[in-house]
Image (tube, rainbow, N blue to C red):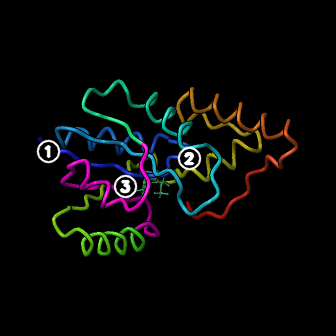
Amino acid sequence: MRRALYPASFDPIHYGHIDIAMRASRLFDELIVAVYDRPNKRLLFSAEERLKLVEESLRHIPNIRFAIYSGLTVDYAQKVGAIAIIRGLRVFSDFELEFRMALANRRLAPSLEIVNLIAGEAYVHLSSSTVREIASLGGEVSTMVPLHVQEALRRKFSELRQNGDNPVYMVSMTD
Ligand code: ADP
């Protein structure tokens, strides 16, 4: 069984992630789409909420499984018996970070392959931070995320507004 791991923050999942997961699922017998619980960035959704949105987006694909993980990605990949880690590559700016991360991960776990899939042309501009920012300002994100994610974003920002939190989710362009 050739198993791969697609790890990310998925805050929230969008069509760029979905495209990468679907393409990766065709290359391996099994793909584990894993939500990293506490990335070093400000999160909008909890790990459980992010997992639920990921599951709803991809559960129609029979060879995809879902998980939440913490700690080092390579440790988790080895624990679940993955032979490869999947990462998407968007614009040039992704390359340096992914390249450095791949080399560091190879040093930590030489037998794990890092597989970088080039983003679908229609999704190169898409990032979770863009989605959050547009949604926080009441903008249209229907071309970026599935309906259940749009609804989750609407609910979350209205909750934040009710709690008196600043719902305008201005972030840097890094994702
Ligand atoms: P992380 O915080 O781990 O970068 P993200 O959820 O932002 O988590 O993205 C994780 C992975 O998904 C990365 O490999 C990234 O390149 C890929 N990705 C993000 N957006 C897109 C997109 N629009 N098209 C293809 N891959 C993408």
Q: Is mark 3 within 8 Å of ligand 1?
A: yes
Task: Return the disc, 1 or 2, that comes first in the chain's sequence.
Answer: 1
Q: Amino acid at mark 1?
A: Arg
Q: Gap between marks 1 and 2, in whole Å?
A: 27 Å
Q: Position of residue 26 (x, y in %)?
A: 21, 38
Quarter of the render that holds ligand 1: bottom left
Label 1 packing within 10 angstroms: few (<14), some (14-19), many (20+): few
Q: Which residues are magenta?
A: 68-94
Report helix, strand or loop for mark 1. Answer: loop
User: Up-down: is 139 above or below 120?
Assistant: above
Residue position for label 1: 2
Locate residue 1, reporting x and y percent.
11, 41
- Tell me where residue 44 appears, x and y as whole percent: 65, 47
Q: Quick check: 33 above or below 55?
A: below
Mark 3 or 1, closer to the camera: 1
Residue type, numbered disc 3: Gly
Q: Which mark is residue 88?
A: 3
Between 138 and 60, the one lying in front of the other is 60
